[in-house]
Amino acid sequence: MFKPVFHRTSTYLTGLVVLLLMVGTIPALVASEEIQWRETLEDTMKEAEKTGKPVMMDFYTDW
């Protein structure tokens, strides 16, 4: 006849916990993928050669 209130509250609480975990971990994952800017091309190319990682160069002008 009556449905227990605890079951409904438990479902909301579980959803809230999952939401809080997602909100807390997603920014941390994004921050770990931050771009590492370098000052000189020579140092960048040496490091890329050592680590085997590609180099992305972005050029811009407003001529």
Image: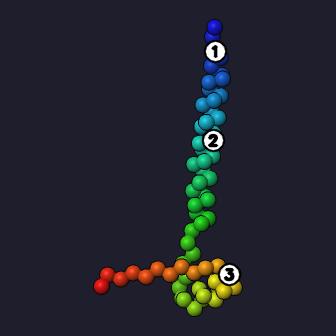
Disc 1 crowd rating (10 Å Cα; few below 14, some 14-19, many 20+) is few
Residue 58 position, x and y percent, is 46, 80
Q: How is the image coloured?
A: rainbow
Q: In which quadrant will I find the C terminus?
A: bottom left
The residue beneath circle 3 is 52
Q: Which numbered disc flags the more N-terminal residue, 2 or 3?
A: 2
The residue beneath circle 1 is 3
Q: Which numbered disc flags the more N-terminal residue, 2 or 1?
A: 1
Does residue 7 sit above or below 54 in this rendering? above
The residue beneath circle 2 is 18
Q: Amino acid at mark 3?
A: Gly
Q: Amino acid at mark 1?
A: Lys
Please identify the quarter of the rendering in which residue 40 is found: bottom right
Please identify the quarter of the rendering in which residue 61 is found: bottom left
Residue at mark 2 to residue at mark 3: CA–CA distance:
38 Å
Residue 21 position, x and y percent, is 63, 46
Q: Are marks 2 and 3 in contact (CB under 8 Å)?
A: no
Callout count: 3
Does residue 33 sit above or below 22 in this rendering? below
**Residue under the image location 55 percent in, 72 percent down:** 35
